[in-house]
Amino acid sequence: MASPPIHLILDWDGTLTASSTLPLIAQIGYDRNLSSSLPSWNTISEAYMSDYREHAANYIPTAADRKTVVQELAWLESWRDVERKSMERAENAGIFKGVEGKDVQRAAEQAIRDGKVVLREGSVRMVKRILQDGGKVGVVSVGWSGEFIKACLKTAMGEMKDGRGARVEDIDVRANEIVGGKDGRMSRYFEERGRNGEGGLWSAGDKRKVTDGLVAAERDCVKVYIGDSTTDLGCLLAADVGICIRTLEGKSDEQTQLEQSLERLGIHCFRLDTMQRDELLIMIRRGGSVGGSSLWWASDFDEICGSPLVDLPRSARKFGPYSWVAFTICPHLKTLLFVRPTSVCLSVLANPSNVIRNAKCRKRGYKIGGSEVKLKQI
């Protein structure tokens, strides 16, 4: 049976990039309108933060009282109006008047070459590897310019020498867009696609809608989402494999907020370099994470590339024509034992020398090291 390809969906700011690119996108407008009297970007940003702080102060339940994923996603969705007002504020100020597509592309190319936009270690290599292996890659962002993202990726990928068969045109980028023109307006992602009244791509719920649409037709693939902020929460939890970016030094505010939210909601987040191949297989079979609500985290894309997710031989990702049974020997250590129901023998895919000699078959389970665990069908 053919190996299931990976469908990788990535966030942009703070995930693929080391920091936000929004100030750089805004600068395109300021450079285009040097003769105009525009409010400073700091003024625009502070107005946004003021709206956010006021909204957070008045929202109920408060962060401390939000204990469920449903409550947290409702809070994240309530930001939509704050994001809408921020975009309208930039439009009304005329920041993007006269901006054309070529201005955006030129600025993106220069930003990559000057090091103003830095893609995370291993990100380009991973994108190319997924595409070359027959998978798909998409980028979903609440940012203001999909063309900026495409131009950055094209410039970065073009500077790599090992990109056989991987083209930026193969990456499906979904984001808002600068329309420019005499009004300096920006597109509303959903309204541009005939969904009147739904506005732009502004919130965690919007990202989930777009991501679901990208993978809706995919029946035989491993759906992977990588993000760094609370805006990615819904997408991370919906994926077969959800991975949070957490830098080991200089963790961003967005990373810290996501980490705190996961802890408050009781969602476990394990270091990706501890992932075992059998855990990945379980997630693929179940369409979700091992042992309920859990995610993974990595410091950069080099770590992700070295994990079973990408490094696993294609033959090991094949599904057999039978169902597997699995149980955890120690849930905290995430050690797993697989048993084929049609066979009397054990097929141990992890730590065989430590497990097989202590296994004794029983009627309803197996006795491992003195503790009995019931079998669980997946």
Image (spheres, rainbow, N blue to C red):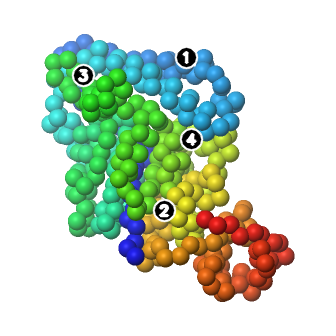
For the residues labelled 1 and 3, say whether their Cβ atoms are less than 8 Å apart. no
The quadrant of the image that shows the C terminus is: bottom right
x and y percentages locating residue 330 in the rendered image? 74, 67
User: Is 254 placed above or below 129 here?
Assistant: above
| Residue displayed at 25% across by 12% down | 37
Q: Which residue is mark 3?
A: 185
Q: Which residue is mark 4?
A: 258
* Local secondary structure at mark 3: strand
Marks 4 and 1 sit apart, C-alpha to C-alpha, by: 20 Å
Q: Mark 2: few, some, or many residues within 10 Å (few <14, many ≥20)?
A: some
Marks 1 and 2 sit apart, C-alpha to C-alpha, by: 39 Å
Of the numbered discs 1 and 3, the one sitting upstream in the chain is: 1
Of the numbered discs 1 and 2, the one sitting upstream in the chain is: 1
In the depicted view, which residue is nearer to us: 107 or 7?
Answer: 7
For the residues labelled 1 and 2, say whether their Cβ atoms are less than 8 Å apart. no
Q: Which residue is mark 1?
A: 54
**Residue situated furthest top in the rendering:** 37
Of the numbered discs 2 and 3, the one sitting upstream in the chain is: 3
Residue 45, quarter of the rendered image: top left
Q: Amino acid at mark 3?
A: Arg
**1 sits to left or right of 362:** left
Q: Amino acid at mark 2?
A: Glu
Q: Amino acid at mark 4?
A: Leu
User: Is 91 placed above or below 232 here?
Assistant: above
| Residue displayed at 66% across by 41% down | 265
Say how many tags the image has: 4
Q: Mark 3: few, some, or many residues within 10 Å (few <14, many ≥20)?
A: many
Residue 130, quarter of the rendered image: bottom left
x and y percentages locating residue 320 in the rendered image? 49, 76
* Local secondary structure at mark 4: helix
